[in-house]
Image (tube, helix red, strand yellow):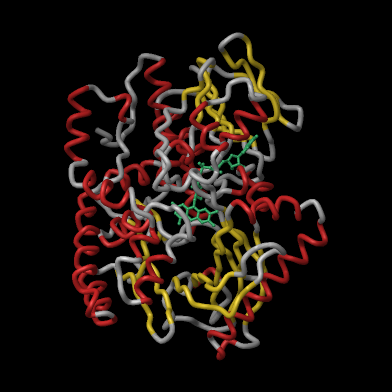
Amino acid sequence: MKKIVIIGGGVAGLSAGIFAQKNGFNSIIVEKNQILGGECTGWNRQGYHIDGCIHWLVGTKEGTKIHDLWTTVGALDGVDIYHPESFMAVEHGEVTVNFYRDLDRLSSSWIEISPEDKDQIEDFCSDIKKLHSFSVPSGKPVDMMNPFEKIKYFVSMKDIGPIMQKYGKISVKELSNKFVHPALREAIASFMPEGDYSAISVLFPLGTFTSEQSSIPKGGSKALANRMFERYISLGGKVETSCEVVELDIKGAAVKGIKCNDGKSFDADYFIAACDPKVLYEKLLKGLYNDPEFEKRYNNPEIYPLASNIYVGVGYEGEMNNIPRTLKFPVESIDILQNQKPIDYLQMTHYGYEPDFAPKGHTVITFAINQFKPELDEWEALASDKKAYSDEKIRIGKEVIHAMETRFPHMKGKLKLLDVATPQTYVRYCNANRGAFMGFWPTISGKPLAHTGNIKGLDNMLLSGQWLQPPGGLPVAVITGKDTIMRICRKEKKDFVASWKYE
Ligand SMILES: Cc1cc2nc3c(=O)[nH]c(=O)nc-3n(C[C@H](O)[C@H](O)[C@H](O)COP(=O)(O)OP(=O)(O)OC[C@H]3O[C@@H](n4cnc5c(N)ncnc54)[C@H](O)[C@@H]3O)c2cc1C
C-alpha cells in the first residue's frame, strides 16, 4: 500500500486524508496543534464557546454537489442546519438595511427605504437571481477534464459569465455608488473596505445565500472539524498531533521524508502540503522551488490583498432573540493600534441559536474587525513586546464592549470580555501567512488564481488548501483536499474512488 504524509490537519488536510483512505492509500496527518481543524475551530472561555470560523457555509443545501462532498467527508452527516433570515443587517442612522434571504422581501424592503432606487434595486436582485443556477464546481478539476467534460462544464457556467463580466471589473464602491440612498450605499460598501475590491465579492455570497446554498451547520466549526476527524479515523487514517514539520528530506525530484520539531520523522511515497503555501515555499522548501504565480501575488499586495481579523469574544448575561444574528452598526470611533485609521462601524454576530455555546439564559457574541496590510505590519511589530501586545488586545476589547453598551443600553454591566484574537494569533496558531483567513481577495485588477497544487521540480509533493482558488474559505479547502487525491490517483494510474457522484 502506498504511503501519503499530509502536512497540516485543517479542512483541506482532513479532506485529503479521507479521500486517501477511501482510495487505498495508507495516510498520516501531521499537525502542529493538539487538535485538528486548523482555522475551522472554536474555543471555550469562562463557560462560553467562541466559534472561530463559520459565519456561513456554502454547501448546506441538499441535492447540490458540494453538499454531497461535505456529507462524504462526514462534515454534515445528520447535522441540523440553521437558516438565518438575513445575511446581515446594516444600520445607518434610523434606517436598517437587511440582506434578506428571500430576494422579494429584500427588494421590497429596500424599495420602501428608497423608492427612487427602484430600478437599480430590481436590476441588482435580478442579477443575484441569475446566480441561483450556480453550483460550486466540486467535481473533477478543469485541467483533469476531457474535452467533452470541459464543454459540459462551461455550458453549466453559461449564466455566470455575464455576471462575472458585469461585476468583476467594477469595485464594491462603484457598485454602491449606483444607489442614491446613503443607507443602501453604506450597506453595500460595508461588504469590503475602501479600495479596489471587485463587486463579485458582494454578488456571490448573496447568490448562494438567497438560493439557500449557504447556511450554518448547528454545533459550529469545531464540531464540524471533529466530525471530519472521526470520519478519517474510522477509515483507518492516522494522526500525529503537536508535531510541527520543520524540514524536508529531498533527493533529486523526490521528497523522501519529513522531520518534525519533536525529532520524529516520517517517510512516504507522496507528500501533501495542506498548510499555508508561504510555509511550504519559504520554510520547508527554503525558497528553492518558489512558484511564480504565488510570488507575483506576494510581491503585489495592493492588487492581491490579504485580510486577517481582530476577533473579539464577549459573553452577554441575557438573550438576544430580537436582534439580527449579524449586525453592522455605527460606533463613535474605535482606535485600532497607534497609526491606523479609527473604525466607525462594528460587525457583531450572536449565537442565540446555539444554546450550548453559553450558560443558560446567556448569549455569546463575536466581533470581527478586518485587518489589512498596514495593520498587519503593526500587529507583527507589536507582538514582539508581549505586554504592549496584550494591553492593546484588552484595550480594544473594552472599547468594543463600550460601543456595544452605547448601542444597546440595556446590556450595560452585563457584557464580559472573553477573548481577543489578532492576526498574530492566526500566525502563531496555524502558521497562516500574515494571519490571513481567506485566500487573496478578488480585486478588479487582480487575476484569479487557479492553481493545480503541482510543485515544479518535485514529482511526489503537492500543495493543497484554500489558497489554490479564490476566494478561499472552507469549500475550497474541502474541494482541493479531494482534488489532490484525484491527482495522486492519476499519477498512480488508478481510478479515483469517491463513494459519491462527482461527475
Ligand atoms: C474568523 C474566521 C472566520 C471565517 N469564516 C468563514 C466562513 O464563514 N465560511 C468559510 O467558508 N470560511 C471561513 N473562514 C475561512 C476558513 O476557516 C478557512 O478557509 C479554512 O479553514 C482553511 O482551511 P485549510 O485547511 O486550507 O487551511 P488551515 O485551516 O490554515 O489549515 C492548515 C493546517 O496546517 C497546520 N500547519 C501549518 N504549518 C504546519 C507545519 N509546518 N507542520 C504541521 N502542521 C502545520 C496548521 O496548524 C493548520 O491546522 C473563516 C476563517 C476565520 C479565521
Residue 417 drawn above or below residue 445:
below
Foreground residue, 319 or 327? 327
Residue at horizontal 51 percent and vertical 26 percent from the top: 292
At which x and y percent is residue 422? 65, 58
Residue at horizontal 58 percent and vertical 64 percent from the top: 50
Rendering quarter of residue 331? bottom right
The answer to whether 356 appears left or right of 31 in the picture is left
Instruction: Residue 266: tell me if it is visible.
Output: no
Foreground residue, 103 or 246? 103
Label total for image = 0
Check the image and name the residue furthest to the bottom: 410
At which x and y percent is residue 134? 24, 48
At which x and y percent is residue 460? 51, 17
Check the image and name the residue furthest to the top: 252
Rendering quarter of residue 210? bottom left
Residue 219 drawn above or below residue 198:
below
The C terminus sits in image quarter = top left
The answer to whether 315 appears left or right of 78 in the picture is right
At which x and y percent is residue 488? 43, 21
Foreground residue, 485 or 155? 155
Instruction: Residue 331: tell me if it is visible.
Output: yes
Residue 40 drawn above or below residue 7:
below
Residue at horizontal 53 percent and vertical 26 percent from the top: 291
Residue at horizontal 57 percent and vertical 25 percent from the top: 290
Residue 121 drawn above or below residue 133:
below
